[in-house]
């Protein structure tokens, strides 16, 4: 995963997040929300950029965002791979992580990535 993002990479990540959740309900522990653009999604999730550690990411800070098809998982953070694709780390209640590719996928569909 990339450890820093340039302006173009920020745009790519934001666009992938917006496309992934477009017209989908955001299922959170604070209720359910429909948002139709990145700004609305960010308002609910409270996405915060961090570039320290093993990867640069936009972390979900305001809520637990559940992955509806796999409700035992919630979104933890969004990252960009060296391949230019956008991924999401999902976590279960025991903090086990699953990495899924969200680039070119719609909510509920994803490509699970072996770690």
Image (cartoon, grey):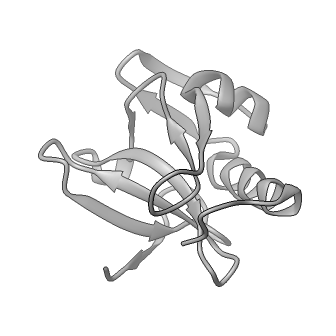
36 vs 68, left or right, is right
Choose top left, top right, bottom left or bottom right for residue 30: top left
Residue 1 versus residue 52: which sits nearer the camera? 52
75 vs 73, left or right, is right
Instruction: Report the number of numbered marks.
Output: 0
**Residue found at the far right of this picture:** 8
**Residue found at the far front of this picture:** 52
**Residue found at the far left of this picture:** 94
Percent across and percent down for residue 106 are 60, 61
The N terminus is located in which quarter?
bottom right
Please give the name of the residue rendered at 74% of the width and 50% of the height, measured from the top-left corner: 14
Please give the name of the residue rendered at 68% of the width and 41% of the height, measured from the top-left corner: 23
Residue 26 vs 12, above or below: the answer is above
Residue 96 vs 82, above or below: the answer is above
Residue 24 versus residue 103: which sits nearer the camera? 103
Choose top left, top right, bottom left or bottom right for residue 31: top left
Percent across and percent down for residue 29 are 34, 21
35 vs 109, left or right, is right
Percent across and percent down for residue 36 are 75, 35
Residue 85 vs 63, above or below: the answer is below
The C terminus is located in which quarter?
bottom left
Please give the name of the residue rendered at 48% of the width and 22% of the height, measured from the top-left corner: 62
Percent across and percent down for residue 32 are 48, 23
Please give the name of the residue rendered at 66% of the width and 22% of the height, measured from the top-left corner: 43
Choose top left, top right, bottom left or bottom right for residue 87: bottom right
Residue 19 versus residue 24: which sits nearer the camera? 19
């Amino acid at each position: 995963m990339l450890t820093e993002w340039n302006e173009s990479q920020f745009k790519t990540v934001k666009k992938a997040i917006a496309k992934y959740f477009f017209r989908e309900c955001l299922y959170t522990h604070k209720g359910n929300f429909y948002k139709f653009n990145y700004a609305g999604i960010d308002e609910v999730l409270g996405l915060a950029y961090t570039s320290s550690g093993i990867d640069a990411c936009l972390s979900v800070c305001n809520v637990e965002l559940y992955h509806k098809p796999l409700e035992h998982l919630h979104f933890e953070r969004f990252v960009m791979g060296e391949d230019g694709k956008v991924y999401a780390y999902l976590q279960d209640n025991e903090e086990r992580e699953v990495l899924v590719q969200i680039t070119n996928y719609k909510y509920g569909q994803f490509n699970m990535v072996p770690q």
